[in-house]
Image: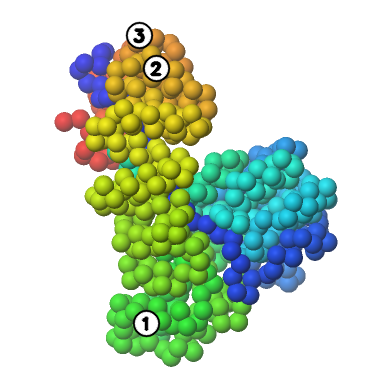
Amino acid sequence: MTGDNHISGGEQRDVIQAQSIGSVTFGAERAGAPQQRYLQDPDRWPVARNWDALAAGAHRARPGEDGSKLPPYVARDVDAELRERIQEAAEEGGLVLVVGDSTAGKTRAAFEAVRKRLPRYRVLAPPVGATLRPAPEALEGCAHLRCVVWLDDLEQYLGPEGLEPEVLAEFVRLRVPVVATMRLKPYETFSADTDDGTGEQRWASLSSRVLRTAEVVDMDRLWSAGELTRAGACEDVRIADAVAHHGTYGIAEYIAAGPVLLREWRRARRTGSGHARGAALVTAAVDLSRAGLRGPYSRGLLVEVHKRCLADAGGSVLRPESLDEAFAWAARVRLGVTSPLVPVTDGWWSAFDYLVDGTESAVPDWVRETALAHAADDDDHYAIATSAYRAGALHVAEAAVRPLAEDGDPAATFNLALLLNKDGRVEDAEALYRRAHDKGELDATNNLAHLLADTGRTEEAEALYRHAHTHGHLHGTFNLAVFLDENDRPEEAEAVYRHAHTKGHLAATNNLAILLKQSDRPEEAEALFRHAHTHGHLDATFNLAVLLDENDRVDEAEAVYRHAHDRGHPEATHNLVLLLDEFGHTRDAEAIRREAAPDDLPG
């Protein structure tokens, strides 16, 4: 079998990638936030073995028969890995991050791991809103005291005066472990490289620099068979009830009453529910959060926003209750666990985060504009801009980031350039990229080089790529290699690809393998494809399958095509169907045809 008659692709190169930017940053103290002195007073930090899970941020469960607020801990499959990572961080320094959906059990698992492995450590758990930049003597004290930094919902601590790269580097230097949790959606927003396919425009946060250093432990929302077996052996009635009735939900999710509150909120939006105004108040808090405005929210703001939420849902036709009744309904605790609106301080509210994660509808532009009008500081502006950019609400993103750029913030200048470029205002974007580049913003250097290459100014583009590469900007290194590759300078490209590959850049590994394959070095190419495939690079998986297919290693090719097909690679689906047809596995091929999108299939 040869590639001439049916193999699709085989050179799934990664194109020039302009660097991720944009920021959601947290750390500035808000009105009423705990003062910095908490961070300077280790005697107030709890000892891990005496620490309370609710204080750590674990979701409350309904009271047990003995009055306990949390059920016994059921061992999770990730426990061994998580505890080993925390032990390593305690010995060498580093950030251990548990990522998963709301109420997946992240906080409880991390809490139990800290208590198990670091029982005598002091726990520095700064309150949200406090500045996370202890004085140097306090940092030294952290190391001397053997303390662990605990950051539940990490996204609230990232950015200026929070867990900046420099602050994390200090913790690492002093071998102070940092243990954190993060919901999956914020993690994907702040860490993902979201190249749009042209390589020119990507948006991530400055906090991605922190997240890239993290040892990430993923926690599934749904429990495995082993976890369910262990839960079934537990005598606690809450866990037994969850095992018996959780259905399509995770055990922790069921115990935390997330699905119950989500269903009740959705029902309350309907005509005749009797709680339409209460549902609108919850919608206001949920959408403000999704728009990027950090909570808690004042009663006045929720009242202001809910009016239009209610009107958009049907207004008086829904026969809404009074405002006091609405707040009472939204704040009533369900199952002894939590409420749709969670009180933070007197007159200030947040949405239950499960509702935020469980909502997929678009955030209206007017909510984003309202959020921006109530932004408290630069961090809110960055967060609102990031949310708006990812949703395609470019006018809101521009309005949020432009004042910061005009104040001289290099990252904001870069963000504004990115927005203008996406909006077709290329000359203005170029000027802003140059301004940010002149201030040392290497992301801007990288994007400026891409813009220049696109407009035929290749010599200046190459010089800028080399500048970014020389200064350690890994995407700039990769982009330089792609530039050389595309300009028929394969030997130079190979050297630069190898440099990026040794630094862990999987797209460089994939492209290097393609280059070697084209240079008739198939064995080395296969080894590199396998390396990138093993580390989750989907195009490399496809390219490995094509190489195997072209060399008549059919069984191996089929297995790798299936792997890529299962993960949504359309050309892998195309090739898999053709391979199965060619070797007489028509029933299997037909089953894939029925499930696949028409565009994924051979004509």
Q: Could you say whether the residue bearing mark 1 is in a helix, strand or loop?
A: helix
* Colouring convention used in this rendered image of the protein: rainbow
Quadrant where the N terminus is found in the figure? top left
Residue 492: image tag: 2
The answer for how far apart the CA atoms under marks 1 and 3 are is: 67 Å
Q: Does residue 189 appear left or right of residue 483 in this picture?
A: right
| x and y percentages locating residue 413 in the rendered image | 41, 52
> Quarter-wise, where is residue 460 in the image?
top left
> Quarter-wise, where is residue 9 in the image?
top left
Q: Which residue is mark 3?
A: 520
Q: Does residue 149 appear left or right of residue 22 in this picture?
A: right
Residue 586: image tag: none
Can you see residue 553? no
Can you see residue 378? yes
Q: Which residue is mark 1?
A: 307
Q: Nearer the viewer, mark 3 or mark 2?
A: 2
Q: Nearer the viewer, mark 1 or mark 2?
A: 2
Q: Could you say whether the residue bearing mark 2 is in a helix, strand or loop?
A: helix
How many numbered marks appear?
Answer: 3
